[in-house]
Amino acid sequence: MSYQDDLDISGVTPGTLERTLRSRADAWSYSAETENAVAHLAAGGHLTPEMRMAAGYYANGKKAAAAAGHDITDPDAPKDDAHKLTAAYRAISQPRPNSL
């Protein structure tokens, strides 16, 4: 993994850094609540110290997960099915070969 955040890497071997980032990537999971907190913090909003720290860990884990190639999108977000709907309308508008 090529991602490196605010880790203190003095005296850390590349293998140890790789294992640390890999474990962050594997432990990370999407949280809509934390996504909102990170966005609120980025917009200059106030959070409790605990939530600010959790948001920082979450953001670092998300970066590590993205660097590891993990899917970091919201699993509950609606998918873009517009192209499927267009293809379906196109298919039903075409005459069938054996229709009378």
Image (spheres, grey):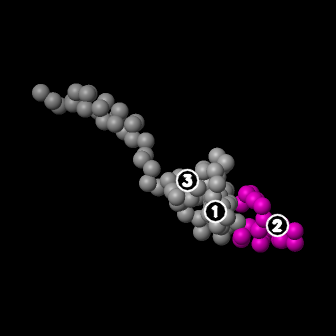
Q: Gap between marks 2 and 1, in whole Å? A: 25 Å
Mark 2: few, some, or many residues within 10 Å (few <14, many ≥20)?
few
Q: What element carries label 1?
A: loop
Tag nearer the camera, 3 or 2: 3
Q: Which mark is residue 36?
A: 3
Position in image of residue 60 (x %, y %):
68, 60
> Label 1 amino acid?
Thr
Q: Gap between marks 1 and 3, in whole Å? A: 14 Å
Position of 43 with respect to 98 (left or right) is right
Which of disc 3 and disc 1 is earlier in sequence?
A: 3
Q: Quadrant of the C terminus?
A: top left
Q: In which quarter of the image is the N terminus?
A: bottom right
Q: Is mark 2 on a helix, strand or loop?
A: loop
Query: Which residue in the structure is indicated by mark 1?
Result: 48
Asked whether 39 falls inside the magenta stretch, the response is no
Instruction: State the extent of the magenta-drawn residues as a range.
Output: 1-20
The residue at 87%/72% (across/down) is 11
Mark 3: few, some, or many residues within 10 Å (few <14, many ≥20)?
few
Q: Which residue is farthest left?
A: 100
Tag nearer the camera, 2 or 1: 1
Q: Nearer the viewer, residue 87 or 17?
A: 17
Asked which quadrant contains residue 17, the reply is bottom right
Mark 1: few, some, or many residues within 10 Å (few <14, many ≥20)?
few
> Label 2 amino acid?
Asp
